[in-house]
């Protein structure tokens, strides 16, 4: 089983739970909505404990399946893979992150139970 992760600072008093699922499919065509409010997330992205590939897409989705952000992995000079996302939303809600492993044509789907406000 391949595991992926998005690491980000979690505010004190909050926790994040991650549970991966796998699904094979073609390159995603995620289209984010535009809302009046947003929050920015900077995260490190890994697959099986290794940096994700440069350009791998990362999507953020509300519980209702609506796409709230799309970004691409970029590599830092120290070899870490990161993503910067502007997550759209109207209110505090739980979002799910998906990482597309382009090298293997697999969506790495995992859920982070963290409310974004």
Image: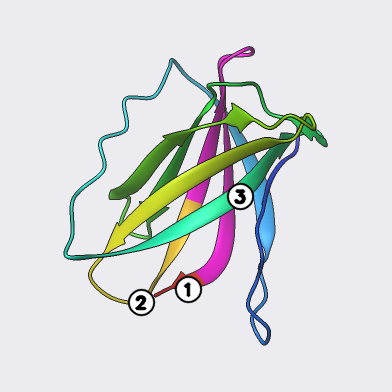
Estimate the x, y position of residue 19 in percent, counting from the top left: 67, 53
Task: State the image quarter where residue 35 is shown.
Answer: bottom left
First reached walking from the N terminus: tag 2 or tag 3 = 3
Mark 1 vs 2: CB contact within 8 A: yes
Instruction: Give the Cα separation between the discs numbered 1 and 2.
Output: 6 Å
First reached walking from the N terminus: tag 1 or tag 2 = 2
Residue numbers of the magenta segment:
97-114
The vertical placement of 40 against 65, above or below, is below
Residue 52 highlighted magenta (yes or no): no
- Disc 2 on helix, strand or loop? loop
Mark 3: give few (<14), some (14-19) or many (20+) Cα within 10 Å: some
Estimate the x, y position of residue 101 in percent, counting from the top left: 60, 23
The vertical placement of 54 against 114, above or below, is above
Residue at position x 51%, y 48% in the image: 97
Question: Does residue 1 show up?
Answer: no
Task: Please identify the quadrant where the C terminus is shown.
Answer: bottom left
Q: Which mark is residue 92?
A: 2
Estimate the x, y position of residue 41 in percent, counting from the top left: 50, 56
* Residue on which disc 1 sits: 115
The vertical placement of 86 against 101, above or below, is below
* Residue on which disc 3 sits: 43
First reached walking from the N terminus: tag 1 or tag 3 = 3
Instruction: Give the Cα separation between the discs numbered 1 and 3.
Output: 16 Å
Mark 1 vs 3: CB contact within 8 A: no
């Amino acid at each position: 089983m391949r595991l992926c992760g998005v690491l980000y600072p979690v505010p004190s008093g909050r926790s994040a739970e991650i549970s991966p699922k796998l699904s094979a499919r073609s390159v995603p065509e995620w289209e984010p909505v535009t809302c009046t409010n947003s929050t920015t997330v900077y995260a490190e992205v890994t697959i099986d404990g290794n940096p994700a590939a440069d350009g791998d897409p990362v999507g953020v989705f509300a519980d209702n399946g609506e796409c709230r952000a799309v970004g691409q992995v970029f590599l830092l000079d120290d070899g870490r893979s990161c993503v910067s996302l502007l997550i759209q939303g109207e209110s505090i809600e739980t979002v799910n992150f998906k990482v597309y492993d382009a090298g293997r044509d697999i969506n790495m789907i995992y859920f982070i139970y963290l409310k974004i406000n």
